[in-house]
Structure formats: structure tokens, C-alpha cells
Image (tube, rainbow, N blue to C red):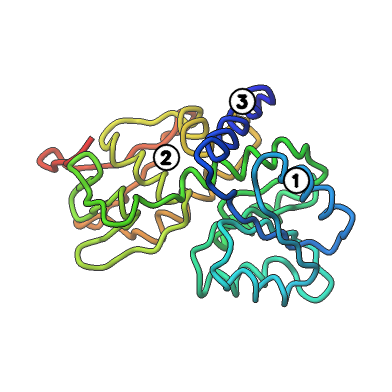
Amino acid sequence: MNTVNSQTKIESGAQMRHSAGLPGPRVLLVDDDVELCHLISQYLAQDGFAVDAVHSGAKGVERALSGEHAIVVLDVMLPDMKGFEVLRLVRAQSPVPVLMLTARGDEQDRILGLEMGADDYLPKPFNPRELSARIEAILRRSRPAPAGMRPGPAELLIVEDLELDKGARIVRRGEQEVELTTVEFDLLEAFLKSAGRILPREEIVRTVLGREFSPFDRSLDVHVSNLRRKLGARPDGSERIKGIRGIGYLYAMSCNSRGDGS
């Protein structure tokens, strides 16, 4: 990730909140390293975040389900239960965004976290600036439209049996609502806007995940796999999202299908 660009985005977000007199988003940090929690809290406070820290999985689940926080930053290794169990319990009851902290080089942990519904991950040790950038990116994706605002044509995407309401951040397959994480929602929005056209991996990583592309980062593939599983097949039984080897992904659509919205 370009550190300079990330810092610019962070400062812009913090400055906008400060100029508007808005309270900073509340972050729940679940990590048993008390000293690290203190350092992260200090740093994030400088960027306009309010941080609550807890040091056990059980307390993390309780606080994450309280509805008081905009995002949860969750360590994989906790004294009473693994972070994955915390994530499973939270995901069963809440769509709150979750960013996992994993051991550097432990790709399996990162993949498992994403498969279980984490929105993103960050390997330890990390630059606090990058943590702020990841949090800002996730929060930008997860913000709903203001209360009472009706979606306009540009906020409603319809392709075959799928309907994506960007304003309310709701996806329906036929009459059934499909629960997606913030990343999965934005991935689907990008695919539906470009239905029938190949989207390069680099473009998806940059615009949806909010970071520079790395050929060794498998997080995009895991998110796409989760999205495929939740959406199921197209009405004709064929695959919705096709991988184009060496290039990217394509959301398939029939010649007579019509997409509404932009």
C-alpha cells in the first residue's frame, strides 16, 4: 500500500469529521496485548477514532454485539478462545465490520478469517498508519444512506434475478434478501455495474479493497468465493461470477438481460 496516499485519505476523513463537529467512529479492539492496545488507541485517537479495548474473546463477543461500535479489530490469538470463534459468534448475530489481526506469514489464518466473514485482515507487526487506512476504507464501504432517503435510479442495480439497493445496502435474489459483508456488497456492486465485461484483478483490488494490488494476496479470491456461495447459480443454473485466468473476473449475463442503474 502507498503509505503517503493512505495517510492523505486518513487525514481527509478525520478533518471532515472535525470540521463537521461529528464524533469519531467507535472502534472495538479485541487483543490481549495491553501495551499494544494502548499504543493503537493513542494513534487512532489522533485520526479521530474513539477506541474501546478488551482483552478476552468472551468480552469481545459481548461488546461486539452491543451495537455500540462501527468496526471490530480482532486479534486471532486470545487467551480464552481463538479469534475465529469470536468471529463466528459475532457473525451469527451481527453484520458489524470485522478486521482481523493475524501473524505475519500465516496465510491460512488470513484465508480462514475471510472465509468466516471477516471484511479484511492485517498481518502483525503492522504500521498503525496502515491500520487507520484499512479501517477508513471499511467504514466508507459500510456507511448506509441517511435515514429517510429514498434510493434513486443510480442507487438501484438490477441484473436478472438480483437487485442491489446501494442506498439501503440491501441485496435481494428474487424475493429473498442475501446477507453480505461490506466487502462482498461492494464486490457485487462492481460486478453488476460491469456485468458482461471482464474486470481486471488490479482494478478490483484498488477500487473495492482500497489498496494496491499484490500477486501474493489471495483475499480477493476468498471474497469472490464467499460471494458465489451466497448468491448461488444464475436462473439458468450457470455460474454467476467467472474467473478469467491471468486477468480477473466477469459477471456473466445473457444477451437479453438488462441492468438498471449505473
Numbered disc 2: secondary structure: strand
User: Which disc is residue 8 wearing?
Assistant: 3
Quadrant location, the C terminus = top left
Q: In front: 113, or 66?
A: 66
Q: Please, what is the three-letter code of the amino acid marked with disc 3? A: Thr
Q: In front: 24, or 81?
A: 24
Q: Quadrant of residue 136?
A: top right
Q: Please, what is the three-letter code of the amino acid marked with disc 2? A: Gly
Q: Pointer 2: what residue?
A: 243
Nearest to N terminus: mark 2 or mark 1: 1
Residue 21 % position (x, y): 53, 43
At x 77%, y 50%, the residue is 41
At x 59%, y 55%, the residue is 114
Nearest to N terminus: mark 2 or mark 3: 3
Quadrant location, the N terminus = top right
State the separation of the CA atoms marked 2 and 3: 33 Å
The mark lying in front, picked from 2 and 1, is 1
Numbered disc 1: secondary structure: strand
Nearest to N terminus: mark 1 or mark 3: 3
User: Which disc is residue 123 wearing?
Assistant: 1
